[in-house]
Image (spheres, helix red, strand yellow):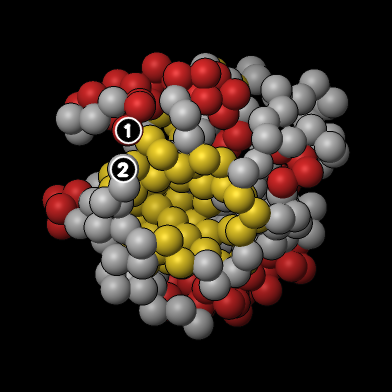
Amino acid sequence: MPADEREVGVHTLPITVEYGSRTITLTPTLVETERGLVLIDAGPEGALEGLRTHLRSLGYALEDIWLVVLTHHDADHAGGLDELLEAVDAVVATHREEAPYIAGERDPIKGDGDRYPPVDVDLELAGGVRIPTLAGPMEVLETPGHTPGHVSLHFPEDGLLIAGDALVADDGSLSGPNPDFTPDTDRALESVGKLADREIEHVVCYHGGYVDSGSERIRELSERGLED
């Protein structure tokens, strides 16, 4: 992530992991607050050491994490949470519609039934909730479609969007959520349209990382549909 982003307390933590039969790079994000660190998405099972290495490079330890915000319940975002919580005493937050999947009350929508260890959710989020950070308020945006309660995080003061899987990046270009992994493409496209109404200058996608483009490109995606 560019230096100006690091200075305002937002750090991307790209990790490369074996996931299923593939090797993939994922992008959890770290946000600094006066209380400590907020981790956006925990990664899949096996991600802990990669996160630990990133935090050390930034001068932090895992124990500095006080809040984990899950954008949604897919295993590549939440599968490593149980292992993380063995190392840290952190609050777990996610949208209220995602909580039953993470807590084990429902099986994940995607997958073959072999789920990750369930974890209790401490805080259920809704759209409009703002979390104070050193980068200014971080606002929860409801962006369903990829999953029923998917959320993204917006920093209005800087125009930064942490998209989760509401958007993906490919070689520095934004695209809509992958239709192959998006059960409700109509709702997902509506969510892209709502994002286009926000003042967004740059985006962090969980798949693809940092992209230096925003509202104009998101508006194009909304108008063209998910095939773009």
Reply above or below: 2 against 136. above
Residue that appears at 64% across and 18% down? 21
| Residue closer to the observer: 217 or 134 | 134
Reply above or below: 165 against 60. below
User: Disc 2 on helix, strand or loop?
Assistant: loop
In the rendered image, the quadrant that contains the C terminus is bottom right
| Residue closer to the observer: 59 or 33 | 33
Which residue has dot 2 on it? 36
Residue 126 x %, y %:
63, 65
Reply above or below: 57 against 141. above
Q: Is residue 94 left or right of residue 171?
A: right
Q: Amino acid at mark 1?
A: Asp
**Residue 77, labelled with which disc?**
none
Q: Amino acid at mark 2?
A: Gly
User: Disc 1 on helix, strand or loop?
Assistant: helix
**Does residue 56 appear in the picture of this structure?**
yes
Residue 43 x %, y %:
52, 31
- Distance from disc 2 to disc 1, alpha carbons, whole Å, reads 6 Å
If you read the primary sequence from the N terminus, does the residue marked by circle 2 or circle 1 appear first? Answer: 2
**Does residue 173 appear in the picture of this structure?**
no
Residue that appears at 74% across and 68% down? 187
Q: Quadrant of residue 78?
A: top right
Q: How many marks?
A: 2
**Cβ atoms at labels 2 and 1 below 8 Å apart:** yes
Residue 178 x %, y %:
64, 51
Residue that appears at 39% across and 45% down? 38
Residue that appears at 46% across and 67% down? 130
Q: Is residue 127 left or right of residue 99?
A: left
Residue 207 x %, y %:
49, 43
Q: Is residue 129 left or right of residue 30?
A: right
Which residue has dot 1 on it? 64
